[in-house]
């Protein structure tokens, strides 16, 4: 597994969760890292992206509530989710444009997903 996502769970509306996405030791460097989510019956959507220089962009639906960050030394990204709403319920996936050790090339990697359930 190249990316390991964790931190999902059940939370009441208004609560907070922090997701983590850790790259395996086979990954040498990472450019952009993204957080996506997929709710039941819906398409996967981009939630947040954090670039190698730590600049960020967010979907309008989460602006002001979610914050992406990363630890480049640990090849780990985080998504702090505050003021959660029932409509935030989804499986959250992390994504990384990353270069494995021994390669000159960057590839697109996906984590396995972590379920976030927000109760009303």
Image (cartoon, helix red, strand yellow):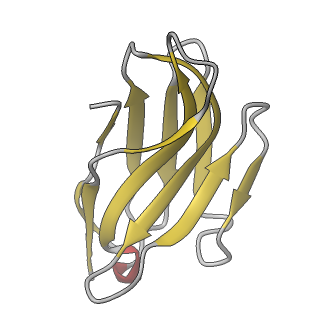
Left or right of residue 76, residue 59 in this image: right
Q: Is residue 35 visible?
A: yes
Question: Image quadrant of residue 30?
Answer: top right
Total of numbered circles in the picture?
A: 0
Q: Is residue 66 above or below residue 3?
A: below
Q: Identify which residue is drawn at 65% across, 71% down.
A: 59
Q: Identify which residue is drawn at 56% across, 31% down.
A: 98
Q: Identify which residue is drawn at 73% across, 58% down.
A: 57
Q: Is residue 23 above or below residue 18?
A: above
The quadrant of the rendering that contains the C terminus is bottom left
Q: Is residue 103 above or below residue 95?
A: above
Q: Position of residue 23 (x, y in %)?
A: 41, 26
Left or right of residue 42, residue 112 in this image: left
Q: Position of residue 69 (x, y in %)?
A: 61, 37
View extreme (bottom): residue: 41
Report the front residue among 12 and 116: 116
Report the front residue among 79 and 40: 40
Q: Position of residue 93 (x, y in %)?
A: 38, 55
View extreme (left): residue: 10
Report the front residue among 112 and 103: 103
Report the front residue among 64 and 108: 108
Q: Identify which residue is drawn at 36% across, 86% down.
A: 42
The quadrant of the rendering that contains the N terminus is top left
Q: Is residue 14 visible?
A: no
């Amino acid at each position: 597994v190249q990316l390991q996502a964790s931190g999902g769970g059940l939370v009441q509306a208004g609560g907070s969760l922090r997701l983590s996405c850790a790259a395996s030791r086979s990954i040498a460097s990472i450019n952009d890292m993204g957080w996506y989510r997929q709710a039941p019956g819906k398409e996967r959507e981009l939630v947040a992206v954090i670039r190698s220089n730590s600049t960020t962009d967010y979907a309008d639906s989460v602006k002001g509530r979610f914050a992406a960050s990363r630890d480049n030394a640990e090849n780990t990204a985080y998504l702090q989710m505050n003021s959660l709403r029932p409509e935030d319920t989804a499986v959250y996936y992390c994504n990384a444009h990353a270069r494995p050790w021994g390669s000159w090339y960057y590839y697109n990697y996906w984590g396995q997903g972590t379920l976030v359930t927000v109760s009303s």
